[in-house]
Image (cartoon, grey):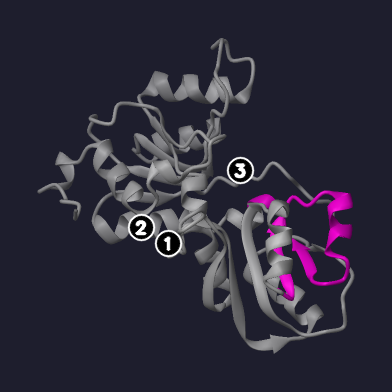
């Protein structure tokens, strides 16, 4: 059923924003370990503005307040496990306490957005890389358009070094950790935003020339066995375009509403170059 927009922006409720997002990535598509959804806040409360980010942090909640937003939409859930105490002992407790204190709703759209095809996390990565003829890398049983990762082809085959340089530029990666180069061109590419090492067998079965993802452990690099190039660009780097993806999804439905992409870099990993 098509979503009906409120008559006026000042009639909008938090639920109106969430309905748009969940029409693209329904909550039931999240993985069992996940905690996507409205973590803090009342869905029936009026919404004054929306701030999109990768991570809900104290700085992001403060930014939302400064910009007049009472809804933060993040990719990563601020709460994964039950909180037994709220005494500010860690950043999770402090962020949740700050949000409740100031009436800021916190929402996460995580693996459910990872698992959708056309407007999902991996589709945005594929778009940045110019991949064509894309499909889900590891579809759920009986579902072609739902699942993990994405597989596609470059318009033209590229030299491996040129491909890695293109990755660093187009995905704004500080560095690229990769396996040994094979001396063969790259044409078929598998991608997975965030930690994607669990998809390496699928990328190998699909005969991908390269697998672009993040969070590979040392010994997992051996598992490529020279059959493809693993290109680990970093977790934040692989998912940073999810912020603009979320912005675009909501802006398409509510083009005149107060929508903002965060200016806070929440990447906890830093590099000495």
Label located before the other in sequence (2 or 3): 2
142 or 80, nearer to the observer: 142
- Which residue corresponds to mark 2? 249
Tell me the tag on residue 164.
Answer: none
Label located before the other in sequence (1 or 2): 1
Q: Is residue 223 magenta?
A: yes
Tell me the tag on residue 119.
Answer: 1
Closer to viewer: mark 2 or mark 3:
2
Magenta segment boundaries in residue numbering: 208-236
Asked if residue 242 lies left or right of residue 203, the reply is left
Q: Position of residue 236 (x, y in %)?
A: 64, 51
- Identify the element where label 1 is drawn: loop
State the residue at coordinates (16%, 51%): 5
Closer to viewer: mark 1 or mark 2:
1
State the residue at coordinates (38%, 60%): 248
Mark 1: few/some/many CA within 10 Å (<14, 14-19, 20+): some
- Identify the element where label 3 is drawn: loop
Mark 2: few/some/many CA within 10 Å (<14, 14-19, 20+): some
On the image, which quarter does residue 102 sit in? top left
């Amino acid at each position: 059923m098509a979503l009906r927009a409120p008559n006026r922006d000042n009639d909008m409720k938090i639920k109106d924003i969430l309905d748009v997002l969940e029409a693209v990535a329904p909550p039931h598509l999240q993985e069992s370990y996940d905690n996507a959804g409205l973590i803090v806040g009342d869905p029936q409360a009026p919404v004054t503005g929306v701030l999109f980010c990768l991570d809900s942090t104290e700085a992001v909640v403060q930014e939302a307040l400064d910009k007049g937003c009472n809804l933060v939409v993040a990719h990563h859930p601020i709460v994964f496990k039950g909180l037994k105490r709220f005494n500010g002992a860690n950043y999770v407790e402090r962020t949740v306490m700050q949000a409740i204190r100031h009436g800021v709703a916190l929402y996460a759209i995580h693996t459910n957005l990872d698992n959708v095809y056309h407007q999902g996390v991996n589709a945005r990565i594929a778009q940045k890389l110019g991949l064509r003829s894309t499909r889900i890398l590891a579809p759920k049983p009986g579902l072609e358009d739902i699942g993990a990762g994405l597989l596609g082809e470059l318009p033209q085959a590229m030299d491996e070094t040129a491909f890695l340089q293109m990755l660093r530029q187009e995905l704004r990666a500080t560095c690229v950790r990769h396996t040994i180069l094979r001396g063969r061109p790259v044409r078929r590419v598998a991608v997975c935003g965030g930690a994607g090492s669990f998809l390496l067998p699928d990328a190998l079965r699909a005969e991908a020339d390269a697998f672009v993802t993040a969070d590979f452990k040392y010994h997992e690099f051996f598992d490529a066995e020279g059959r493809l190039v693993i290109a680990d660009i970093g977790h934040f780097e692989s998912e940073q375009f999810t912020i603009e993806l979320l912005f675009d999804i909501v802006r398409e439905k509510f083009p005149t509403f107060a929508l903002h992409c965060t200016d806070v870099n929440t990447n906890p990993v830093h590099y000495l170059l």
